[in-house]
Amino acid sequence: KDIYLETDGIIICSELGKKKCLEWDSRFESDRIHVVNPSINLEVIEAIWTTEKKDEIVFCGRIIDQKGWRQLCDAAIKDDLKYDITFVGHDTAKIKNYYKDNDNHSINVYEDLNDAEKFQIFKRCRLGIILSRHEGHGIVPAEFLACGKPFVALENDQLRREYGNDLVYAKSSEKSDVLEAIHKAWDHQVSEETTQKIRLKYSTVRIISCVSAIVFRMGSVKVRNIKELVKGYSPKNLVLDKKNLVFGVMNNDNEKVQTLVDAFANEFRQASN
């Protein structure tokens, strides 16, 4: 929090996150916190053309209790409707230890897919689903909508605020409510207007433009002891007489973090020093 309070600007991924930040400490100022949603890989989505269709519902996310994967399985494997249940994400293999295929449902698990492989699955399926109790932003529904597929979510403040009525909401994680939402979304057609709206909002070009404008509006950034702020991990290419943009990455692999930092710096180097 001390680092956040010292910065000239904070970029955060949702209005709800900004609200929580302002509630966290009265010293945060609203005009220093800028909301920019994440982007999705539209180039890959638009490049994939497939006629493959499957009666399949797809869960994409981490296999942790907060995401509601158990509630999904408990409900879906007892559904009279026949379809595959596909999990895309991290640690998906362990699902096979808890749930088995039955006459109506085959359970598929995929790990470490690239975007092309992931969106191929999204485009062939009937619908996407995740039953998170909370989301920081909730980017997965946007990816499905951009592929023209309906999405089922557990009713929560962030997703309702971000997507309004573009999603199909389960009133609770109880079996009857989950199945009601799946059946409602089964034959639902996502409108072309919704797909294009999502593709525009989450386009990489738009996000880069937003971040560039924010960085320029920040004006002169006071240079502080940046090496102390990053706990001894000295960034490359640090020039103390120029502006320095500081941002946090949730990853404990320094090599990957440095790759991301370098890529981010290269994106803006010509536009601004």
Image: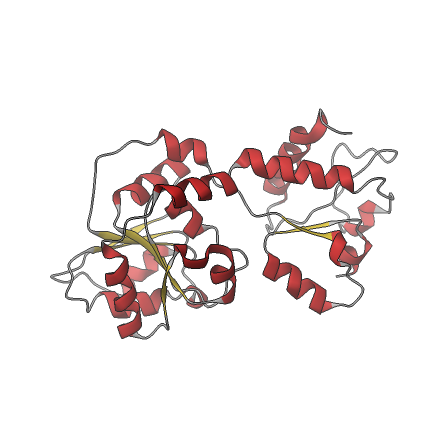
Q: Is residue 212 left or right of residue 93?
A: right
Q: Is residue 71 left or right of residue 90?
A: left
Residue extending farthest to the left is 103
Query: Whole-percent x and y of residue 8?
Result: 80, 49
Q: Is residue 50 left or right of residue 1?
A: left
Query: Whole-percent x and y of residue 148?
Result: 33, 43
The quadrant where residue 176 appears: bottom left
Query: Whole-percent x and y of residue 256?
Result: 59, 41
The quadrant where residue 122 appears: top left
For the point 44% across and 48% down, the residue is 142
Q: Does any portion of residue 239 appear in the rendered image? A: yes
For the point 61% across and 36% down, the residue is 208
For the point 34% across and 45% down, the residue is 191
Residue extending farthest to the top is 270
Count of numbered marks: 0
The C terminus: image quadrant: top right
Query: Whole-percent x and y of residue 141?
Result: 42, 52
Q: Does any portion of residue 258 appear in the rendered image? A: no
179 vs 5: above or below: below
184 vs 232: above or below: below
The N terminus: image quadrant: bottom right
For the point 70% across and 47% down, the residue is 247
Residue nearer the viewer, 21 or 68: 21
